[in-house]
Amino acid sequence: MRAAMAGPDSKRPDDDHSTLARIMGERRGKAAALRASGRDPYRNDVRPTHTLGDVRRRYEPTKPAPAAPGGTDPGISPIDGEVVRVAGRCVARRGFGKTVFAPIRDGSADLQLYLNVDHLDATDFAEVLPQLDVGDVVAAEGAAFWTKRGELSILVTRLWIVTKSVRPLPDKWHGLTDVELRYRQRHVDLAISPDVREVFRKRSLIVRGLRRYLDARGFLEVETPMMHPIVGGAAARPFVTHHNALDMKLFMRIAPELYLKRLVVGGFDRVYEINRNFRNEGLSRRHNPEFTMLELYQAYATWHDLMDLTEELFAELAQEVNGTTKVTWDGVEVELGRPWRRISVRSACVELGGVPEAEAAAMFEDPARGLELALKYGVDLKAAVMAMLEGIPDLAGLELGELLRELKDPAARPAVARRLAERYPSVDEARVRAGHLGFLVFEATAEDKLVQPTFLTEFPLAVSPLARKSDADPAFCDRFELFVCGKEIANGFSELNDPDDQRERFLAQLRAKAAGAAETMDYDEDYCRALEVGMPPTAGEGIGVDRLAMLLTGQPSIRDVILFPLMRPES
RNA sequence: GGGCCCAUAGCUCAGCGGUAGAGCAGCGGCCUUUUAAGCCGUUGGCCGAAGGUUCGAAUCCUUCUGGGCUCACCA
């Protein structure tokens, strides 16, 4: 509903003669009628003896075989005669004069009430039942029985309207299809759509499963600051806020990483945190500005251990939540059972991205060739140039706008690329920049082809400012990301614990900022000091809980697994 | 922020230049095993907002608001 602006001349929606106003008026009238007969329409004295799920579980095994067609009316015979008291929201009402069927719903199940003049208390029939609307919360007492059509029902002897609903629910068959309304009025969406409730029930099971898995392996759950004095732990733009008493600028955290690793320094060898991160970026089907991240750190482990852990964890969760390791997402059947494919960034470019082996080899070695190839494979020109500039300590004479103009002309590219490459202080730095360009080619050519669960491995150093350098090649690092259906779900690495190397990486971030990058980390000297104390060799990983929930519930949009996704205010 | 699409009764939708329609819900009847119950009758709308074109606009044009998809940024 897009409510009209409540200007001075406009009628308030509930004051006019619209259907809604009339229906609400009628329902308030029914509440008044209940009061007039001495019944509180918002009573607080209901104590159900059973949930609807209890009743179902108890009597489901007694379900009789379907009656033969044309047989004699079996009449009503309670199953065991035990009187139960149940409560729930009335979700439909089918009236037959002297009989009313009213299915109700609680947090566990649906169950039908059978309200009949011969069985229901006479005053309840005369004074309560006429006031009953779909949407009301009711309580009922009676014995369970099976109807002729095989529906488990309560033969109701007493009926109470516990909470009068004065605002009507949407169409019982179609429900809410307007996604805007579904997100804005999630209470309604949940009340009428069992599928939606199931998604969020599963999300809760997933989070519980994550905790159980980690707790069982000696991990300690901790909470670290959500408000940070400097930006760190990821590459993203932060939300900015302000503390009045300290007159201090604060950033809503974009990642808890640097705090959690301080805890490893402090001796918590296995820690994790499940909490919100905030990133001041655009919204999409995969992005909500606040999102939930699991980050875990394990001392004396490597990135390989965490890949194993992730495989096991996901397979267990899938089994627990869905009873199978198969799930359909984005229209494809995904198999989460172990083992998953592991492929390096460079191999992915070749095998999935269609980049010839010779080109892949060249672009990860030589940034000048890398720039050419990046442009050939459709990498954004500005992104590619910024990736090159990040490695140049002194940017004098290298103005970004000017370079972009020059590079518009393909014929001029080799010369410009050479000119940039010559400014690197070392061959090592040149190879690092080449790695960045190669990664951009990966994103352009291969990322969306990682459909079945795949660990992407051997990340270029330039895009991994907190990960440990690879012993085999210092232009790469011991890092992986998990992709499913082209979407990144997890990111882990052996942690960089050399304080001097870490300082260099922070300086590289400052250079990136100078070159024009908007999403960079601040230099965190306090964190470097912590590393100087000595952090044991550690592997860490972040798992996007919302995306994990999307995967395990098969939902296409992150907004379908976040109860209250960010929306612009109405009107 | 760019591109494409959407907005009509409480809900789900039709109408797409000639002055507003259906189903569900509601209300009044009938109906004692229904389950999208059924049948008869009936209420209900400044057609998202503001401008414009036109004899005439829900319908065509422009702008705005909100939303969806998508691109960019990122997880």
Image: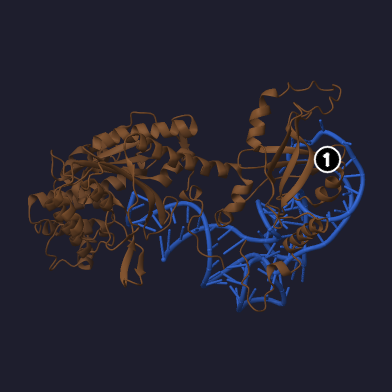
Chain colours: A brown, B blue
**x, y (%) of residue A488?**
35, 44
Above or below, A14 against A285 in this view is below
Name the residue at 59% across, 48% down: A190
Q: Position of residue A463 (x, y in %)?
A: 23, 50
Q: Is residue A525 above or below residue A452?
A: below
Mark 1: few/some/many CA within 10 Å (<14, 14-19, 20+): many
Quarter of the view holding residue A551: top left
Residue type (three-letter) at the residue carrying disc 1: Leu
Q: Nearer the viewer, residue A250 or A262?
A: A262
- Where residue A457 sits: x, y (%)? 25, 39
Image quadrant where one finds the N terminus of chain A? bottom right
Q: Residue at x 21, y 45 (%)?
A: A495
Q: Residue at x 69, y 68 (%)?
A: A13
The chain identifier of the residue carrying mark 1 reads A
Is the residue A215 above or below the residue A499 in the image?
Answer: above
At 69% from the left and 57% from the top, the residue drawn is A167
Residue closer to the observer: A137 or A4: A137
Outermost residue, left direction?
A: A426
Question: So how many labels did they put on this image?
Answer: 1
Taking the image as shown, residue A47 lies to the left or right of residue A465, namely right
Q: Which residue is mark 1?
A: A120
Of the 4 image quadrants, the one containing the C terminus of chain A is bottom right
Element under disc 1: loop
- The reply, left or right, for residue A471 in relation to residue A446 is left
**Residue A485 at what x, y percent from top left?**
40, 40
A219 relative to A476 in the view: left or right: right
Residue A230 appears in the picture as rendered: yes
Tell me if residue A351 can be seen.
no
